[in-house]
Amino acid sequence: MARILKALGLGLVIATIVWLVTLWQWQNAERDIGMSDIVVQLIVLPLLLTLGLLAALWGVQRLRTPVAAPATAPSAGEGAADTALSAEAQAQRDASAWVLAEAVHLPVGTDADTAWSILQAGGARPDLDAHLQDLDGLPVFTARVPEIELDDWLLAHGELSHPDEGGLPSAVLRALALIEAPLHQVLDALTSLRTDLTDGDMSSASDEAPALNDAEAFGKAHLSGVARPMALAQQASREAQRPRVTVRVLWPSHWQEADREAATAWLQSQCGTLLDWVATVQAHAPAWQVTPLAQAESLWAEIDQHLLRWAREPRPELLLILAVDSAIDADRIDHLQSVGELFTAQHQTGRVPGEGAAALLLAHPQWPHLRAQMPEAMRLWRPVCGRRDKSADVAGRIGCTTLTAVLTEVLQRTTPPHESLMVVSDADHRASRTGELFEALQGVAPELDPLQQVTRVGEACGDLGVARALVLTALACAALRASDQAQRVAVATHVQSPHERVVVALSPMPPQPAVLEAA
């Protein structure tokens, strides 16, 4: 019935148009109008046009509709293949890692727990900087880490020279001072991490037993001719289980290559704890990756590839990630203002320069006996990334379609109660970022209380540069530890970039399942 009414309505519209045009032509024509003209142009022509348009619409619909293949019963082989594919897809969807340790160094705190508590208390805001001015000679708002004094820090680090004495630029030295504490805080978590522990005994008996040397393992094999292949197989198995460590360092992309190399060399000199742990557990030498990224959010695409590979490979592996940035520098302030990105009284849609550092230590989801060693580890789910078509910095209304889609996918994976959801975002004072975030949350979680469950780190810490890639996740871990909700989930929501949108979900380690005692 509905289709008939639509067809009649379409015919009425076409007839009205044809009649109006025809009557206008007849009015301007200098000839008599006969009965045949009336029948042809006022009745036949509208009818033919309506039928032709309906036929064209029907043909287009047929072309768009795929031809259904004849239904056949799937064979046993096809069913098994479909099951394997669905299992692999589910494993990729649920790929994750354990956050063993997190650390930050921010204007609001020198560790994640302190920074989170200060952010929850409110009141922390960027302030006028007493040392920096814009191109007009006016003081600028910055989010400076107050306890960093380069002169005092360089006195305690004789291996580095002052910029006036030919050393690294002050911005690079300030970044090293920022990253030092988070690095050591995260490395301290390695001291108790092993791969050979049992759930019931935290001290491994294999540590007390002397390892066989090559002569003992293979020398006797020559006598029997049987033990040697077994020793080779055992050695191959042990080699496959040796842990791997990857260190990913994210330096600011605007640094000179020589400055990045010097900063990496200094950072490696601070990793004595890491090298000691590698020697203790007989892990592979750490692999360092320092390729700069144009966008901080691109780091999560790399992490996602690690998680997918870990879902396929059971080898124990750690991923240590460090990120640091500082815009508390006169040259950086001038650059931001020259490109129209500095917050000033005349340009309040600009960014507030900030600084900070963060570190994360991620472990393979199947790390042996992790629950007994790190019961407070947090589960990091696969990040979900999206890209806006329209820049969030352009004039006009800023939509939230991309962010809504990303948040929806994340919440479908974790399915937390909305009252237990905590949102940690890098949204700042700009209405474009805050409006997009709140509008998207209203669409996907209308029961969420923005005042109690949303924390905007950018409002207190300004623009953290590439450090924002890790700061939100580290603070989300601190938020989970500080919460008393049973089924709590925290989502680190990145909206600072004009185009990139990334959401990372974290949840606590599930409780140990109860073990029934034998009667």
Image (tube, rainbow, N blue to C red):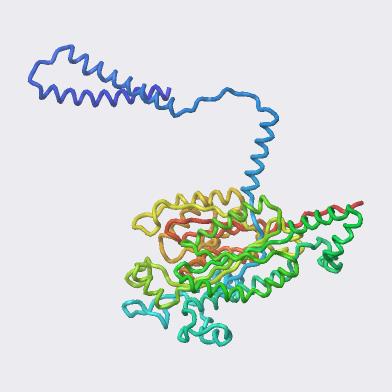
Which residue is depicted at the point 41% across and 24% down? 3
Determine whether, in the image, residue 171 is placed left or right of residue 34. Answer: right
Kindly give the residue lying farthest to the left in the view shown: 30
The total number of labels drawn is 0
Asked if residue 484 can be seen in this view, the reply is: no
Q: Position of residue 192 (x, y in %)?
A: 74, 69
Q: Position of residue 349 (x, y in %)?
A: 37, 65
Above-or-below relation of 162 to 394: below
For the residue pair 512 and 334, the one nearer the viewer reads as 334
Kindly give the residue lying farthest to the top in the view shown: 35
Q: Position of residue 464 (x, y in %)?
A: 49, 69
Q: Position of residue 294 (x, y in %)?
A: 46, 62
Which residue is depicted at the point 54% across and 76% down? 176
Above-or-below relation of 212 to 440: below
Determine whether, in the image, residue 432 is placed left or right of residue 373. Answer: left
Determine whether, in the image, residue 219 is placed left or right of residue 131. Answer: right
Above-or-below relation of 45 to 484: above
Which residue is depicted at the point 61% across and 48% down? 93
Kindly give the residue lying farthest to the front in the view shown: 222
Which residue is depicted at the point 48% across and 68% down? 252
Name the quarter where the N terminus is drawn.
top left
For the residue pair 108 and 466, the one nearer the viewer reads as 466
For the residue pair 451 and 36, the one nearer the viewer reads as 36
